[in-house]
Image (cartoon, rainbow, N blue to C red):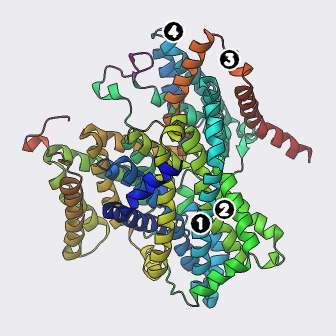
């Protein structure tokens, strides 16, 4: 493992890779600060740019983008009460009141320190758990892997806001879309309708660009105007904020632990981690009555959990190929684009890639924090940028990026179609992340399902007789039954 | 009894139709190749039908509402943007689709390099309500960025358009 770490770390001596880290951090910071865009859009738009890169630099670049987003999102949340990304929402509760009473710099100092240290906490947990996960992964055969994929899909559907059935339908549609095209398992074309373009299936990158980025642009165009109004010039001392985190180290450690644990659960993501952490900090605090009025503990809880979740979310992503969040689903897309098979092989054979992601995240958190602190006033003002500038620029990048992967002009049509489809998904309450995770895991699930049946000679009991797959099956049933049980309990009360 | 078709109902019906079509087509494949599509397709159709019934009887599905916070979609994340009515929303959606399809049409006809210049300039001039100078500057900035990044750095030859001799597809 140490050799793999050295191999990945050696890339940082390459000036080109250092440039990627700087660029990725800046892009993450920028997309994070622009409300509504965030890490998902940043990764979707930037994925094609990695096409010409080597595996490790590409992973470092993608990780650097991810690392810069959370702190970028906290700046407009603190200065303008407008969260850059959804997981920064809880930062408004205490960050903005601090800013209004003239402690904007102190709040940004708290956010920068909690963000950076929170991310490092999550990544340390990831590195500590890695040897154990590597051993567990080796116990997984095709039946266990199939059940794990099923568990991941059901959890993602459950984690979606609103109706669980919609989450399951979204995941189902995603899996069905993944079946389109040539199946290397069965050596046959399926669901192409004689259309030559579909022989390779629905292409990953254009589909993700459409679902995540173009749908967002359509939303922007419909809502119009500027992203946010208002102006704020932060005052106070940043160093006071740094000291504040040390003063509330228990809150920081507890919130980072919550962020990491929630991050590990597939599909749940930063917003849930953020709110659970905030609520827990409020309940545990001696000054809970000042939460929402500018209590530094609230900001520490929100920001440290938001950043720590990335380390947690990486664990199922690199260990089992089950994305821990929507950003991780896009990262899986990056793996596939660079010829890496998501799943157990990644953590057993490509530890250098895992370390590249860790290095990229750590470096970008440090860089984004420095950049964010230096440019905080300008980043705050970015939210006043007119939507009419953002739409054409990002749309051009989406079209050109989608085309550049295979130099196939019809991939641009796929981007438009997927964008409209994604917009309808969001509008009618279907979770897009369940769709994408279903799409990414569909073929993997089918492959392990078929392999399991080949091993058992067609006997379906293989999914229930192996101890690990049986436990996972019980968990799947548990997650499916949970909403009914909760409803019944609520009615009883 | 008259049933009022909402947008949500229509979209759910569309998803059910898609899953149903997959099931229907899968029946024509050999048994091993159709197993998973049939399994997932039938389950998706069943759940989709449940959703359609739920559109008519909302209480039936309310027990399946879960309250873990939003993380995937993002419409709620941009609450600061102005709220628009359904009819206006549909109109703006159509206009945006028109821009995207128009942009693609230009790309197909005259290629990326010309289409990008026309699209960005037209869009910024129409919506940003700024002078020609600023609109041209933004357009030039985007054009130079795309040209340098894709043609020079990544070395991807951008589609030149059928009018300039590119093939109809790839």
Q: Do the residues labelled 2 and 1 touch (CB within 8 Å)?
A: yes
Measure the alpha-carbon separation of dots 1 and 3: 44 Å
Residues at marks 2 and 4 on the same chain = no
Q: In which quarter of the image is residue A203?
A: top left
**Disc 1 crowd, CA 10 A, few/some/many (<14, 14-19, 20+):** many
Q: Do the residues labelled 2 and 4 touch (CB within 8 Å)?
A: no
Measure the alpha-carbon separation of dots 3 and 2: 39 Å
Measure the alpha-carbon separation of dots 2 and 1: 8 Å
Does B167 appear above or below A65?
above
Label 3: which secondary element:
helix
Q: Mark 4 lies on which chain?
A: B
Label 2: which secondary element:
helix
Mark 1 or mark 3: which comes first in sequence? 1
Residues at marks 2 and 1 on the same chain = yes
Q: Name the residue under label 3.
A: A462
Q: Are marks 4 and 3 in contact (CB under 8 Å)?
A: no
Residue A363, x across and y down, in percent: 47, 65
Q: Name the residue under label 1.
A: A88
Q: Nearer the viewer, residue A306 or A36?
A: A306
Q: Mark 2 points at which residue?
A: A274
Q: Name the residue under label 4.
A: B31
Q: In this view, does A64 lie to the left or right of B126?
A: right
Q: Mark 2 lies on which chain?
A: A
Q: Give the range drawn in magenta.
A: A183-194
Q: Can residue A161 be seen in this view?
A: no
Q: Mark 1 lies on which chain?
A: A
Label 1: which secondary element:
helix
Residue A414, x across and y down, in percent: 34, 39
Residue at 35% in and 53% down: B96
């Amino acid at each position: 493992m140490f050799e793999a770490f050295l191999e990945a770390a050696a890339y940082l001596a390459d000036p080109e890779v250092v440039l990627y880290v700087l660029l990725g951090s800046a892009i993450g910071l920028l997309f994070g600060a622009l409300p509504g865009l965030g890490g998902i859009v940043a990764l979707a738009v930037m994925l094609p740019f990695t096409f010409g890169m080597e595996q490790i630099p590409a992973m470092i670049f993608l990780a650097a983008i991810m690392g810069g987003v959370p702190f970028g999102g906290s700046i407009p949340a603190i200065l303008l009460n407008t969260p850059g990304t959804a997981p920064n929402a809880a930062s408004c509760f205490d960050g903005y009141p601090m800013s209004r009473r003239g402690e904007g710099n102190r709040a940004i100092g708290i956010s920068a320190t909690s963000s950076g240290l929170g991310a490092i906490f999550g990544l340390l947990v990831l590195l500590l758990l890695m040897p154990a996960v590597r051993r567990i992964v080796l116990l997984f055969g095709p039946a266990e892997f199939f059940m794990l994929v099923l568990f991941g899909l059901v959890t993602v559907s459950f984690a979606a806001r609103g109706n669980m059935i919609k989450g399951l339908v979204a995941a189902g549609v995603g899996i069905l879309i993944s079946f389109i095209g040539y199946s290397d398992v069965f050596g046959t074309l399926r669901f192409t309708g004689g259309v030559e373009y579909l022989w390779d299936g629905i292409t990953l990158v254009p589909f993700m660009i459409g679902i995540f980025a173009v749908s967002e642009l359509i939303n922007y165009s419909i809502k119009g105007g500027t992203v946010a109004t208002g102006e704020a010039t932060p005052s106070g001392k940043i160093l006071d904020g740094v000291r504040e985190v040390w003063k509330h180290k228990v809150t920081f450690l507890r919130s980072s632990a919550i962020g990491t644990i929630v991050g590990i659960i597939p599909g749940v993501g930063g917003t849930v981690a953020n709110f659970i952490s905030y609520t827990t900090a409020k309940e545990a605090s001696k000054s809970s009555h000042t939460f929402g009025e500018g209590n530094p503990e609230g900001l520490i809880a929100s920001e440290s959990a938001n950043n720590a979740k990335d380390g947690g979310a990486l664990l199922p992503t690199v260990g089992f190929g089950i994305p821990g969040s929507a950003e991780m689903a896009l990262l899986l897309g990056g793996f596939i684009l660079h010829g890496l098979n998501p799943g157990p092989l990644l953590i057993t054979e490509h530890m250098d890639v895992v370390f590249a992601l860790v290095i990229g995240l750590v470096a970008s958190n440090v860089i984004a924090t420095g950049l964010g602190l230096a440019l905080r006033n300008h980043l705050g003002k970015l939210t006043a940028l007119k939507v009419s500038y953002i739409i054409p620029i990002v749309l051009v990048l989406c079209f050109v990026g989608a085309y550049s992967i295979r130099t196939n002009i019809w991939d641009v049509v796929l981007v438009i179609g997927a964008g409209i489809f994604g917009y309808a998904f969001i509008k009618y309450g279907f979770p897009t992340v369940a769709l994408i995770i279903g799409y990414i895991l569909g073929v993997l699930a089918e492959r392990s399902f078929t392999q399991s049946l080949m091993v058992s000679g067609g006997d379906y009991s293989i999914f229930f007789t192996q101890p690990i797959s049986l436990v996972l099956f019980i968990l799947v049933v548990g997650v499916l039954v949970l909403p009914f049980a909760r409803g019944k309990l609520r009615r009883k009360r | 009894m008259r049933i009022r078709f909402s947008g949500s109902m229509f979209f759910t019906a569309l998803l059910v139709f898609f899953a149903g079509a997959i099931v229907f087509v899968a029946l024509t494949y050999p048994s091993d190749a159709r197993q998973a599509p049939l399994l997932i397709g039938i389950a998706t159709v069943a759940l989709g039908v449940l959703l359609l019934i739920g559109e008519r009887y909302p209480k039936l599905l309310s027990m399946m509402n879960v309250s873990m916070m939003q993380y995937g979609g993002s419409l709620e994340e941009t609450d600061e943007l102005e709220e628009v009515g359904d009819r206006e929303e549909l109109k703006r959606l159509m206009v945006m689709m028109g821009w995207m399809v128009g942009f693609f049409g230009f790309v197909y006809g005259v290629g990326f390099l010309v289409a990008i210049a026309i699209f960005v300039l037209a869009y910024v001039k129409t919506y940003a309500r700024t002078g020609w100078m600023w609109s041209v500057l933004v357009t030039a900035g985007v054009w130079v960025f795309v040209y340098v990044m894709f043609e020079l750095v990544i070395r991807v030859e951008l589609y030149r358009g059928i009018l300039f001799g590119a093939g109809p597809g790839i």
